[in-house]
Image (cartoon, helix red, strand yellow):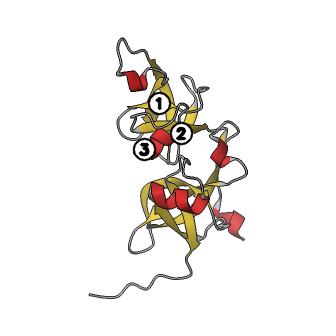
Amino acid sequence: MLLGRVIGTVVPAMLVDELSATPLLWVQPLDRDGEPEGEPLVCADGTRMAGPGQVIYWVASREAALALDPWFVPVDDAIVGLVDEVRVYSPKDLD
Amino acid sequence: MILGRIIGSVVSTIHHPIVDGRKLLLAERLDQNGLPTGGYVIAVDAIGAGHGETVLVLDEGSGARQILDDAAAPVRSIVVGIVDAVDLEAT
Protein backbone atom coordinates (compact mmCIF):
# COMPACT_ATOMS: atom_id res chain seq x y z
CA MET A 1 0.00 0.00 0.00
CA LEU A 2 1.26 3.47 -0.84
CA LEU A 3 0.39 7.10 -0.23
CA GLY A 4 -1.33 9.30 -2.80
CA ARG A 5 -3.14 12.60 -3.18
CA VAL A 6 -6.47 12.89 -4.96
CA ILE A 7 -6.01 15.38 -7.79
CA GLY A 8 -9.32 15.01 -9.57
CA THR A 9 -12.57 13.22 -10.12
CA VAL A 10 -13.08 11.00 -13.15
CA VAL A 11 -16.54 11.30 -14.69
CA PRO A 12 -17.08 8.42 -17.08
CA ALA A 13 -19.34 8.72 -20.10
CA MET A 14 -19.60 4.98 -20.49
CA LEU A 15 -18.32 2.03 -18.44
CA VAL A 16 -18.55 -1.72 -18.50
CA ASP A 17 -21.48 -2.84 -16.32
CA GLU A 18 -19.19 -4.21 -13.62
CA LEU A 19 -17.77 -0.73 -12.94
CA SER A 20 -21.02 1.22 -13.08
CA ALA A 21 -21.33 1.68 -9.28
CA THR A 22 -17.67 2.50 -8.70
CA PRO A 23 -16.53 6.06 -7.89
CA LEU A 24 -13.32 6.83 -9.75
CA LEU A 25 -10.72 9.36 -8.64
CA TRP A 26 -7.52 10.55 -10.22
CA VAL A 27 -4.62 10.03 -7.80
CA GLN A 28 -1.02 11.23 -7.80
CA PRO A 29 1.20 8.71 -5.95
CA LEU A 30 3.40 10.27 -3.25
CA ASP A 31 6.79 9.36 -1.86
CA ARG A 32 7.32 8.93 1.88
CA ASP A 33 7.89 12.67 2.29
CA GLY A 34 4.59 13.49 0.60
CA GLU A 35 6.18 14.64 -2.66
CA PRO A 36 4.68 13.48 -6.00
CA GLU A 37 6.38 10.38 -7.34
CA GLY A 38 5.50 8.55 -10.55
CA GLU A 39 2.58 8.96 -12.86
CA PRO A 40 -1.04 9.65 -11.87
CA LEU A 41 -3.46 6.74 -11.88
CA VAL A 42 -7.18 6.23 -11.56
CA CYS A 43 -8.29 4.61 -8.30
CA ALA A 44 -11.69 3.25 -7.36
CA ASP A 45 -12.68 4.90 -4.06
CA GLY A 46 -13.43 2.20 -1.49
CA THR A 47 -14.14 4.81 1.21
CA ARG A 48 -16.57 6.82 -0.96
CA MET A 49 -15.41 9.85 1.01
CA ALA A 50 -12.23 10.98 -0.69
CA GLY A 51 -12.13 14.18 -2.70
CA PRO A 52 -9.61 16.43 -4.45
CA GLY A 53 -6.70 17.43 -2.20
CA GLN A 54 -7.21 14.52 0.19
CA VAL A 55 -4.19 12.37 1.06
CA ILE A 56 -5.11 8.70 0.92
CA TYR A 57 -3.49 5.28 0.88
CA TRP A 58 -4.25 2.88 -1.89
CA VAL A 59 -3.71 -0.73 -2.74
CA ALA A 60 -2.91 -2.19 -6.14
CA SER A 61 -3.64 -5.45 -7.93
CA ARG A 62 -6.43 -7.88 -7.05
CA GLU A 63 -6.65 -6.62 -3.46
CA ALA A 64 -8.12 -3.42 -4.88
CA ALA A 65 -11.25 -5.33 -5.85
CA LEU A 66 -11.75 -6.29 -2.19
CA ALA A 67 -11.82 -2.68 -0.96
CA LEU A 68 -15.08 -1.88 -2.70
CA ASP A 69 -18.74 -2.31 -2.01
CA PRO A 70 -20.10 -4.05 -4.08
CA TRP A 71 -16.88 -5.98 -3.94
CA PHE A 72 -14.85 -7.97 -6.43
CA VAL A 73 -15.32 -5.54 -9.27
CA PRO A 74 -12.65 -5.49 -12.00
CA VAL A 75 -10.32 -2.70 -10.83
CA ASP A 76 -6.56 -2.62 -10.34
CA ASP A 77 -6.10 0.29 -7.89
CA ALA A 78 -8.36 1.29 -5.00
CA ILE A 79 -8.36 3.73 -2.09
CA VAL A 80 -8.52 1.87 1.26
CA GLY A 81 -8.40 4.80 3.69
CA LEU A 82 -7.99 8.53 4.19
CA VAL A 83 -4.78 9.76 5.79
CA ASP A 84 -5.10 12.19 8.71
CA GLU A 85 -1.40 12.32 9.43
CA VAL A 86 1.85 10.57 8.53
CA ARG A 87 4.10 10.46 11.58
CA VAL A 88 7.71 10.06 10.56
CA TYR A 89 9.69 9.20 13.67
CA SER A 90 12.74 11.28 14.40
CA PRO A 91 16.06 9.46 15.00
CA LYS A 92 16.26 10.87 18.54
CA ASP A 93 13.02 9.07 19.43
CA LEU A 94 15.20 5.97 19.57
CA ASP A 95 17.22 7.27 22.54
CA MET B 1 9.03 -10.71 1.33
CA ILE B 2 11.11 -7.58 1.67
CA LEU B 3 13.34 -6.17 4.34
CA GLY B 4 12.35 -2.78 5.70
CA ARG B 5 12.91 -0.46 8.61
CA ILE B 6 10.06 1.17 10.49
CA ILE B 7 10.33 4.94 10.13
CA GLY B 8 6.82 6.10 10.93
CA SER B 9 3.14 5.38 11.11
CA VAL B 10 0.03 6.45 9.24
CA VAL B 11 -2.94 7.86 11.16
CA SER B 12 -6.27 7.21 9.48
CA THR B 13 -9.77 7.67 10.86
CA ILE B 14 -11.79 6.82 7.77
CA HIS B 15 -10.76 3.50 6.31
CA HIS B 16 -11.86 0.01 5.41
CA PRO B 17 -13.14 -1.87 8.52
CA ILE B 18 -10.24 -4.35 8.34
CA VAL B 19 -7.90 -1.55 9.49
CA ASP B 20 -9.96 -0.92 12.66
CA GLY B 21 -7.76 -1.41 15.73
CA ARG B 22 -4.69 -2.18 13.65
CA LYS B 23 -1.59 -0.11 13.25
CA LEU B 24 -0.40 1.09 9.86
CA LEU B 25 3.37 1.34 9.73
CA LEU B 26 5.56 3.26 7.32
CA ALA B 27 8.53 1.08 6.41
CA GLU B 28 11.42 2.16 4.21
CA ARG B 29 12.83 -0.54 1.97
CA LEU B 30 16.41 -1.64 2.56
CA ASP B 31 19.09 -2.75 0.11
CA GLN B 32 21.67 -5.51 0.63
CA ASN B 33 23.78 -3.17 2.76
CA GLY B 34 20.91 -2.29 5.03
CA LEU B 35 20.63 1.20 3.54
CA PRO B 36 17.36 2.80 2.40
CA THR B 37 16.61 2.34 -1.31
CA GLY B 38 14.27 5.35 -1.35
CA GLY B 39 11.24 3.11 -1.68
CA TYR B 40 8.69 2.59 1.06
CA VAL B 41 5.57 0.65 1.85
CA ILE B 42 2.60 1.15 4.18
CA ALA B 43 1.99 -2.12 5.96
CA VAL B 44 -0.46 -3.43 8.54
CA ASP B 45 1.31 -4.47 11.73
CA ALA B 46 0.77 -8.11 12.68
CA ILE B 47 3.62 -8.49 15.15
CA GLY B 48 4.01 -5.31 17.23
CA ALA B 49 6.96 -3.76 15.43
CA GLY B 50 8.20 -0.37 16.57
CA HIS B 51 10.34 2.55 15.54
CA GLY B 52 13.73 1.78 14.06
CA GLU B 53 13.23 -1.95 13.93
CA THR B 54 14.23 -3.94 10.87
CA VAL B 55 11.24 -5.93 9.76
CA LEU B 56 10.13 -8.56 7.30
CA VAL B 57 7.25 -7.28 5.18
CA LEU B 58 5.06 -9.64 3.20
CA ASP B 59 3.90 -7.75 0.10
CA GLU B 60 1.41 -10.18 -1.32
CA GLY B 61 -2.34 -10.21 -0.88
CA SER B 62 -3.41 -13.79 -0.32
CA GLY B 63 -0.75 -14.32 2.34
CA ALA B 64 -1.86 -11.10 4.05
CA ARG B 65 -5.48 -12.26 4.03
CA GLN B 66 -4.42 -15.59 5.53
CA ILE B 67 -2.66 -13.81 8.42
CA LEU B 68 -5.60 -11.46 9.00
CA ASP B 69 -7.94 -14.44 8.75
CA ASP B 70 -10.29 -12.52 6.48
CA ALA B 71 -10.81 -13.66 2.91
CA ALA B 72 -12.10 -10.21 1.92
CA ALA B 73 -9.38 -7.99 3.40
CA PRO B 74 -8.09 -5.39 0.93
CA VAL B 75 -4.59 -5.55 2.37
CA ARG B 76 -1.43 -6.42 0.49
CA SER B 77 1.45 -5.39 2.76
CA ILE B 78 1.78 -6.77 6.26
CA VAL B 79 4.65 -6.79 8.77
CA VAL B 80 5.20 -10.45 9.60
CA GLY B 81 8.50 -10.44 11.47
CA ILE B 82 11.13 -8.45 13.32
CA VAL B 83 14.68 -9.11 12.11
CA ASP B 84 17.61 -9.43 14.48
CA ALA B 85 20.38 -9.63 11.93
CA VAL B 86 21.02 -10.30 8.27
CA ASP B 87 24.29 -11.99 7.33
CA LEU B 88 25.46 -11.21 3.85
CA GLU B 89 27.69 -13.95 2.45
CA ALA B 90 30.46 -12.88 0.10
CA THR B 91 30.03 -14.65 -3.24
> The C terminus of chain B is located in which quarter?
bottom left
State how far apart marks 3 and 2 are (Cα): 10 Å
Identify the element where label 3 is drawn.
strand
Identify the element where label 2 is drawn.
loop
| Percent x, y of residue B68 | 60, 58
Name the one closer to the observer, A64 or B12: A64
Mark 1 belongs to which subunit? A
| Percent x, y of residue B72 | 55, 47
Left or right, residue B1 beside residue A54: left
| Percent x, y of residue A6 | 50, 28
What residue did someone put label 2 on? A67
Kind of residue at disc 3:
Ala
What residue is drawn where x is 65% and y is 59%? A90
User: Contact (CB < 8 A) between labels 1 and 2?
Assistant: yes
Name the one closer to the observer, A68 or B5: A68
State how far apart marks 1 and 2 are (Cα): 9 Å
Circle number at residue A44: 1
Seen in the picture, residue B59 relative to A58 is either above or below; the reply is below
Seen in the picture, residue A83 relative to A11 is either above or below; the reply is below
For marks 3 and 2, give the one nearer the viewer: 2
Task: State the image quarter where residue A51 is shown.
Answer: top right
What residue did someone put label 3 on? A60
Q: How many labels does the image show?
A: 3
Q: Residues within 10 Å of mark 2 (few under 14, many from 20)?
A: many
3 or 2: tag closer to the N-terminus = 3
Mark 3 belongs to which subunit? A
| Percent x, y of residue B9 | 64, 53
Left or right, residue B31 beside residue A67: left
